[in-house]
Amino acid sequence: MAVREVAALDVGVDTSAVTPVRRQRRLGGLFVASVIWIALVGLGAIFAGLLPIPSPTEMDMLGKRALPSAEHWLGNDVLGRDVFSRLIYGGRISLTVGLLAPVIGVTVGGALGMLAGYFRGRFETIVTGGVDVLLAFPPLVFALAVTAYLGQSILNITLVIGILGIPAFTRVARAVTLSLSEREFVTAARALGATHSRILLRELLPNVALPLVAFFLLGVAVTIVVEGALSFLGLGVPPPAPSWGSMIGEGRESLDIAPWLAFLPAIFMFLTVLAFNVIGDTLRALTDPRPGAL
Amino acid sequence: MDTALLSVEAVSVVLPTPRGPLKAVDAVDLSLAPGRTLGVVGESGCGKTMLSRAILQLLPKRAKLDGRVMFNGRDLAALQPEALRRLRGPELAVVFQDPMTSLNPVLTIGTQLVETMQAHLGLDSAAAAKRGAELLAEVGIPAPEQRLRQYPHQLSGGMRQRVAIAIALSCEPKLLIADEPTTALDVTVQAQILDLLAREQRRRHMAMIIITHDLGVVAGRTDEVAVMYAGRVVERAPTPQLFAHMRMPYTEALLAAIPKLDAPPHTTLPAIAGRPPDPTRPLPGCSFAPRCRYADDRCQGAKPPLADPERAGALYACWHPL
């Protein structure tokens, strides 16, 4: 029995040495559905102006809270505006803010965290101190202050959420870099005459990138929710421009007579966030060359 | 005797610890001629690895190095970081103990091998890839072109150590330091790796330092052996001479601790009793005295110097040589 097992193992090793085939991993229906959903929302957001849908801001006072019809696929809201069109245009804001804000976090936070974890010393003290200050700052007060002084716009909201996301990315990047810097392959790279920038970019970054990308997609999901919350509180994009958060906020007033006005944007947000999380998990599992954990 | 490629002169390494300064390496002198092999032997914690890191200038940031590390007429300890960086790879290279951690887990073997050559030798990517495959073939890896595209976790431990050796050899170093190159490997693979190192060393006429805790590893494969204990070299002699007539009781005890094939079953292995002295609390006398069966009052009171009183080419630090 044991002998046969060993023989089978040998054959396996030999064939993989000659033709290193990458084992096919099944993607799964959930992943495909998530990609399709994000593609639909994304394409809709990009080409919203070209789609044959009614204007998202045009009010039809006679058609308040109208039920779905051929003209208005998902009905009208409290002010008689087309709900489907507002969902499409709302996706524009949710996706713009949701994707750009974590980009700020992952670039600034990732770079700071890696430098702090690699060089240590006084720089690390300053970075971790700054990150702690930023973490201790009440996010809502910060958002309120920025929008009050600089005005409500997509740019300002993106910046606010992006800056608030820096500490988390810094901590992830620093923690991963700290543990990796102790590994012998970093010493080996130094022993082969690699410069600091080379070690950081070629040796450490590919290792740090895996957890950072997974965390980035989580950040996208969280940001979409945060943007919704800010819009719900009236701190987001100013009306009449639609955003999923502000649509939920407006729909709240007629929850008893027309609950779909709040639930439809909520469902869109839920599906988008879920899709990003599913894609993030699957991509991490697909791109990680290491078998399971290290 | 040709001029030394490497000469370590009175090198000491002090590490700051919460319990006080720790003298990991204590006034070590060594020299190595081009194309020769030196074995550094000693038990865990005796300063072997710190000595190798001191030669390579890869000590931890807070460690303090005294003495000179002369390599090809230049003092590595006083060299500017940029000049030192240029020496690493084409002049100095190292193979580490654990091939599981000395290769980057997320880069392919090819990337790790090829990029080093591109950086140091200025090869274009096609030439470097070709050379990479040749190197893998030289270190005994079958189907090298396919292996270049694989990740470290797809290779066995012995294979990985072969890859690590290929990377270290890629820039034709003049000095290779192998820091316990076989400790993490299977016994059957150990001999293969050591033979590989010896073969490549002869072929390339490079100098090599093998660091190990196993006297058996250095026996047939080195020109000279230095035995370290508690940060000091306690015996240094040409290999045949050392094994023919060892002077230091510690060396004798190390050799006695190797299991013998012809010993009857259930023979008790003569292990060295006790532990090495606490390196943060140096002893006034010989560091080995507390564990030595020949020790007397003189050993407790005064440190024996590393000397060659018989003018036989063998140095030892002992008041009561065997």
Image (cartoon, coloured by chain):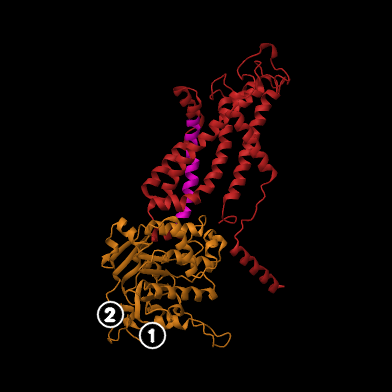
**Distance between mark 1 and mark 2 Cα atoms:** 17 Å
Find residue A160 and report its horizontal and vertical position in percent. 48, 31
Q: Which amino acid does the dot numbered 1 rest on? A: Pro
Q: Any mark on residue B1, and which? A: 2
Q: Quadrant of residue A265?
A: top right
Which stretch appears magenta?
Answer: A158-182
Residue at the (66%, 43%) spot, across then down? A31
Chain in orange on the image: B
Residue marked by disc 1: B240
SS majority, magenta: helix
Q: Which numbered disc flags the more N-terminal residue, 1 or 2?
A: 2
Q: Is residue B138 above or below residue A156?
A: below
Q: Chain of mark 1?
A: B
Q: Any mark on residue B18, and which? A: none
Q: Which amino acid does the dot numbered 2 rest on? A: Met
Q: Quadrant of residue B206?
A: bottom left
Q: Which image quarter holds the C terminus of chain A? A: bottom right
Find residue A269 and report its horizontal and vertical position in percent. 63, 32
Horizontal placement of B73 versus A245: left or right? Answer: left
Write down the colour of chain A.
red
The answer to the question of whether label 1 and label 2 lie on touching residues, with beta carbons closer than 8 A, is no
Q: Which image quarter holds the N terminus of chain A? A: bottom right
Residue B176 inside the magenta-drawn segment: no
Callout 1 secondary element:
helix
Q: Quadrant of residue A65?
A: top right
Find residue B172 and report its horizontal and vertical position in percent. 38, 66
Residue at the (54%, 85%) spot, across then down? B261
In the depicted view, which residue is nearer to us: A190 or B172? B172
